[in-house]
Image (cartoon, grey):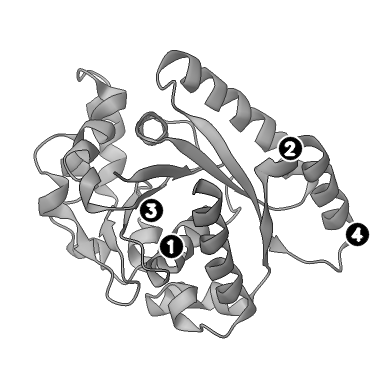
Amino acid sequence: MSRIFCIANQKGGVGKTTTTVNLAAGLALTGKRVLLVDLDPQGNATMGSGIDKRALDPSVYDVLLESASIADTRRPSPQGGYQVLGANRELAGAEVELVDLPHRERRLKAALEAVRADYDFVLIDCPPSLSLLTLNGLCAAHGVIVPMQCEYFALEGLSDLVNTIKQVHANLNPELKIIGLLRVMFDPRITLQQQVSEQLKAHFGDKVFNTVIPRNVRLAEAPSYGQPGVNFDPASKGAQAFVEFAREMSQRLG
């Protein structure tokens, strides 16, 4: 049965989508069967996987409203080697439509039950806010992977996220826990980043992944070509770091 992970951080612009897409591709390279679920109405993980979000029909929106199944909706990433449950602007409307529906925060969990045996990993890319969409991701997941930059404001956002995870764990999903913190866009030349990195390790200990993702131009360029950075330029430092991260995560989970 698959392990289901949210990639989440309530702060925007911290590399959630880059992490989700490249971790999916990295895990696929190590021989794992992976499903990427895009829960962000911007659909960046969908486009970054090489799938045109404008041509999606059905999409994750239809899955949440129970008018389509994941089996009918998922598509293969042309370059990434994993499958995608894609999103587009339609998903923004799901927020309003879900409010009055029964089991509104467990819709994704119920839909994933039907396909869990098909995958080793399910990775959920969450929007940067605590919305009904993020709540669906957290209720479906076994754990949360938190990508974060080593900057002061990132530490503030992290405490909010930890509190949110505790609340969801207590009230909605007793399986939920933090799997680990991934340091992304890291530049070792900046003293503050090194200091924050040390603070993270001192406070969270072995919850901080050993792998560090460097700031890397090739990773930033890859989405415009509709490819994960891991496939776009396998020799780049960023791509190699994500493959290493995929290996570390597999080993950590046994």
Q: Amino acid at mark 3?
A: Gln
- The three-letter amino acid code for the residue at tag 1 is Val
Vertical comparison of 123 with 246: above or below: above
- Residue named by callout 3: 42
Task: Kindly state the secondary structure of the residue where label 4 is placed.
Answer: helix
Amino acid beneath label 2: Phe
Q: Between 115 and 184, which is closer to the camera in this rendering? A: 115
Query: Mark 1 and mark 4: span between their CA atoms?
Result: 29 Å
Instruction: List the residue tagged with mark 2.
Output: 204
The answer to whether the residues at label 2 and label 4 have Cβ atoms under 8 Å apart is: no
Q: Upstream in the sequence, badge 1 or badge 4?
A: 1
Judged by depth in the image, the label closer to the viewer, 4 or 3, is 4
Q: Position of residue 215 (x, y in %)?
A: 68, 69
Compare marks 3 and 1 and give the one earlier in the sequence.
Answer: 1
Q: Are marks 3 and 1 in contact (CB under 8 Å)?
A: no
Q: Mark 2 touching mark 3, by CB under 8 A?
A: no
Q: Nearer the N terminus, badge 1 or badge 2?
A: 1
Left or right relative to 2: residue 103:
left
What label sits on residue 21 in the rendered view?
Answer: 1
Q: Percent position (x, y) of residue 217?
A: 62, 78
Quarter of the rendering occupied by the N terminus: top left
Q: Earlier in the sequence, mark 4 or mark 3?
A: 3
Q: Which mark identifies residue 191?
A: 4
Residue located at (59% from left, 53% from top): 13
